[in-house]
Amino acid sequence: MSQNKPVRNAANAADPRRWAALAVVLIASFMDAVDVTVVNMALPSIEGDVGASSSQMQWITGGYALAFALGLITGGRLGDLFGRKRVFLLGVAGFTVTSLVCGISHSPELLLGGRIAQGAMAALMVPQVLSIIHVTFPERERGKVFGIYGAVMALGTVMGPLIGALLVQGDVLGWGWRPIFLVNLPLGVAGLIAGALVIVESRAERAARLDVVGVVLATAGLLALVLPLTQGRELGWPAWTYVSMAASVPLLAVFALWERRLTRRGGSPLVVLSLFSRRSFAGGQGVQLMFGLASGVFFLAWTLYLQVGLGWSPLKTGLSGLPLSAMMMAGAGVSMQVLVPRFGRVVLQAGAVLATASMLLFLYWARHYGADIAQWQAIVPLVPMGLGMGLIVAPLTDLILSEVPHEHAGSASGLTNTTVQLGQAVGVALSSVVFFDRLGHGSPADQAQRMPHAFAGSLWYVAGVFAAAFVLLFALPRTAGRKATSAPAQPEQQQAPVPVP
């Protein structure tokens, strides 16, 4: 480690701006988490207002996710090279402007372009959140911080549909669906001003040029994989979708070979492959993928089951998800602050067991009661599911980044977010097999009658994925996250963020 770089230890911990900076980046994370799902509740209103075709409607939802997933790794690395604060603020500014474009759109083409651009701006903004946290807070405080981060992400994920339902049904100022995008404007402007004032700039110590070849190869490989997964089900899985997914394998293999070659030559690769030699990082990525797979299927099937199978309104559906969000927040807090520091990896495995058991309980009630299931029975399984996911999500993020050098924080953060997005895309694609094949075709009445059977079938899959996550967690060290109590406390030696002019 260079002796010319300042070392920040207790002084870093004493800087009160780090908590204000945390609030700014968490607001940005919340905006993104909400924006992923908020549009779903407004699709009928959007379709009627701007005259979008069914294909355009698919892209209005899928275009954001696709641009977001493709840009995350590159966005994270750009922060490492050119300054995390700088790239974060650029992402916030772009996200705010593209939200305005979406909100004032009067044609499906402009709305679609705005959504794709919005996803690209989110890909610049979101990876900086974890990397800024990683380099700004001393190790002893990261448990609390990642607990808060996990709670905010849980809240945003579940609040998206609820916020969408409230804004659309409330018809704020007679603007119909447009406030779902325009609500980002005051948050974005406030985030820009506050972020410029309180976030400390940082970047990799040995900043180099961007790995352009790696960007092209990674983007091409991910596009070949994610595009058919995003659009395949709606298009009936034409031949090109299978060709594209097959082509992604050699493209990503060439990408890995290029990154390895660049590393040997002393260059600055887009993805530092040596990170996968660390058990916490590699095992954590596998668990993240499992959670993406589970959530990609569950939330789609759950929403349709409640609205089509049980006849619930969008608002009632959104409200029913609040216990899940609340328990995820509680689980994230208690796991990071109390349980993981004392018991280590077993806490995360207990969370996987809880999530698996909750799906089996939901499965039993859905099969036994069908469309006659009581409201409380449809909500109760979300409590252990939320608690179990909360016990895993926040500490897992901390454990993944715990062994990552600060200079690679952005790259690691982008890769972690990409893993989740990829898992969700694969999960949505697999829903055509585990959910929609059981649902079949026919009139809305016929589908509503078969909905409990289709939903129960998907829960077998979700329970299996959570069980697989339990097994993958054995890849983490047994004492991962546990705080040593026998050795005397040592002063922290934490590398300071490298100032950027």
Image (cartoon, rainbow, N blue to C red):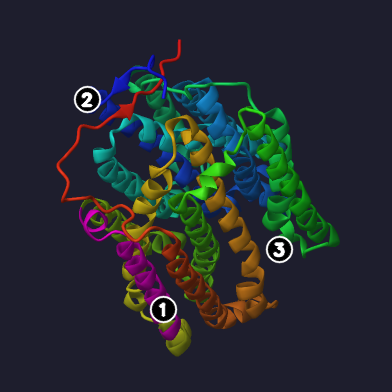
Residue 28: percent from the left, percent from the top? 42, 35
Above or below for 240 versus 189: below
The answer to whether residue 53 shows anywhere in this view is no
Residue at the image point whose x is 69% and y is 78% from the top: 442
Q: CB atoms at circles 3 and 2 under 8 Å apart?
A: no
Residue at the image point whose x is 46% and y is 33% from the top: 128
Classify mark 2: helix, strand or loop: loop
The answer to whether residue 252 shows anywhere in this view is yes
Distance of label 1 from label 3 (alpha carbons): 26 Å
Residue matched to label 1: 362
| Residue range of the region highlighted in magenta in the rendering | 338-364
Residue placed furthest toward the right: 239
Residue matched to label 2: 16
Above or below for 350 versus 484: below
Residue 459: percent from the left, percent from the top? 50, 76
- The local crowd at label 1, few if under 14, some if 14 to 19, many if 20 or more residues have their Cα within 10 Å, is many
Distance of label 3 from label 2 (alpha carbons): 49 Å
**Of callouts 3 and 2, which one flags the residue occurring earlier in the amino acid sequence?**
2
Q: Quadrant of the C terminus?
A: top left
**Relative side of 300 to 352, left or right:** right
Residue matched to label 3: 233
Residue at the image point whose x is 48% and y is 37% from the top: 126
Q: Dominant secondary structure of the magenta stretch?
A: helix
Above or below for 31 versus 463: above
